[in-house]
Amino acid sequence: MSSSIILPDNKIITPYQADITVPNWMVSSLERVMQYFVDKNLRLDTISADRMPKPVEGKKYMLYVHIPFCHTLCSFCTFHRFLFNEEKARAYFISLRKEMQMAKDLGYTFESMYIGGGTTTVLEDELARTIELAKTLFPEMKEVSCESDPQHLANPEFRQLQGLVDRMSVGVQSFDNGILKMTDRLDKFGTGEETFDRIMAAKELFPIINVDLIFGFKGQTQEIIQSDLDMASKLDPRQITTYPLMITHQTRKSVKGKLAAPHGEMMDQYRQILNSLVGQYTQLSGWAFGKTNDEGFDEYVIDYDEYLGIGSGSFSFLNDTLYVNTFSLRKYQERISQGRMAVEQQKRYQKKEIMQYRFLLGMFSGRLSRQYFRDNFNVNLDTALFKEMSSMKAIGAIKNDPNNPDDIIVTDNGKMMGLVMMKEFYSGMDNVRAQLRKPLAKQDM
């Protein structure tokens, strides 16, 4: 378990002791409540859409870019991805840059860009050209975040991204070779020791390196988790992210009972993570930790209420409306070649639904604020979301900030509940992706 940390200036950090007291049955109850709301609000009752709306003056936007290719497909991953084909991938990047120009022509400007996948670095030269174009089209862009798997860090071509990517997030999942073997990652990406060495070598390339870890695997003991956290800490990255393993309808058969740990272990594992990382890092969200409290991280929806997604299978949220791009590579290429953006579905949300979503994000990020709800919805948070606020107060998940009545402190119980809620929300989004991919025929791949 965690022990005292001595910094270079001989300052001693006392170990953090997470105060998580909610019982397992309460966590299970919250999961069921979240599953109800997720199934209700993420239902695919969309209508067709042919174009994106124009931007609203005064709003800030983030650009999401999706690269749906991987050399290998992990059994527990539910993101939109296809097996890598170089010819298709190069054609895709060309279309992606055309769609980016279309967003510019609509009048959008972006403060930040997040590149997700799939494996974003399958073609480093194409990715570099895409980022260069983005920085030319949107000179106001302050940060570019990107994902990669550990194997690509060793490619000589990876250095093309130096100076273009500000934050590189590496999907480690675990440094333990037993966990890597169980998840079919050992042969694909190498041993934990090899991954450690690759990240250490890549640190000099990017201002921010983020190490992604997953907890909740079957057989992942406290000793294994602690070893993973210790290995990550030795790398001294700017950020560490610790995701819970997410089981969706799509992965339930392949993951539950084979890869997933019993439900009751999650709380003890999360307590261990907090005890190990809080003090070394600032907690940025329920599962993200950083050296400072003002840098971007994977859950970009926390910092940006509105974002536009380009690429096959990407989502946008603009003007209270969810927009969905086609999941078919064939249709994607056809639309772009016709001078149209890739959006094909939309769903508008009501004010109450959006407030509940923002409440979820506030709990997860620890940034729950009455002022935010007054400014953005013109409501009193305590009355507009009375049930949500009352239930969280009753279990000691939130309390008033004695220094500012508008701010709400999210306690360790609240962090646990925020993590559970966000996990179920992302699982629901993965179920949506699975449903959108299901109709794809061979010619769509």
Image (cartoon, rainbow, N blue to C red):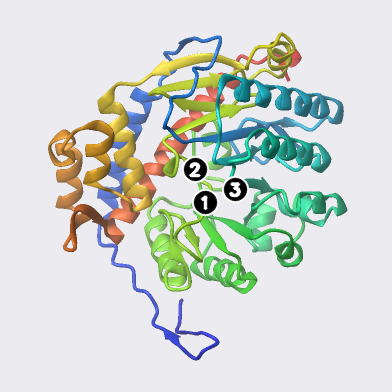
Question: How many numbered marks, from 0 up?
Answer: 3
Looking at numbered disc 2 in the image, what kind of residue is underneath it?
Tyr
**Residue in front for this viewpoint, 293 or 218:** 293
Asked if labels 2 and 1 touch by Cβ distance under 8 angstroms, the answer is: yes
Q: Position of residue 292 (x, y in %)?
A: 48, 64
Residue 118 relative to residue 417: left or right: right
Badge 2 density bin: few <14, some 14–19, many ≥20, Cα 10 Å: some
Residue 385 relative to residue 88: left or right: left
Q: Which residue is mark 2?
A: 300
Quadrant in the picture for residue 197 = bottom right
Q: Position of residue 150 (x, y in %)?
A: 72, 54
Q: Which residue is mark 1?
A: 296
For marks 2 and 3 on the same chain, the one whose residue lies earlier in the sequence: 3
Q: Which residue is mark 3?
A: 143
User: Residue sitting at 67 percent across and 17 percent down?
Assistant: 328
User: Residue sitting at 62 percent across and 35 percent down?
Assistant: 138
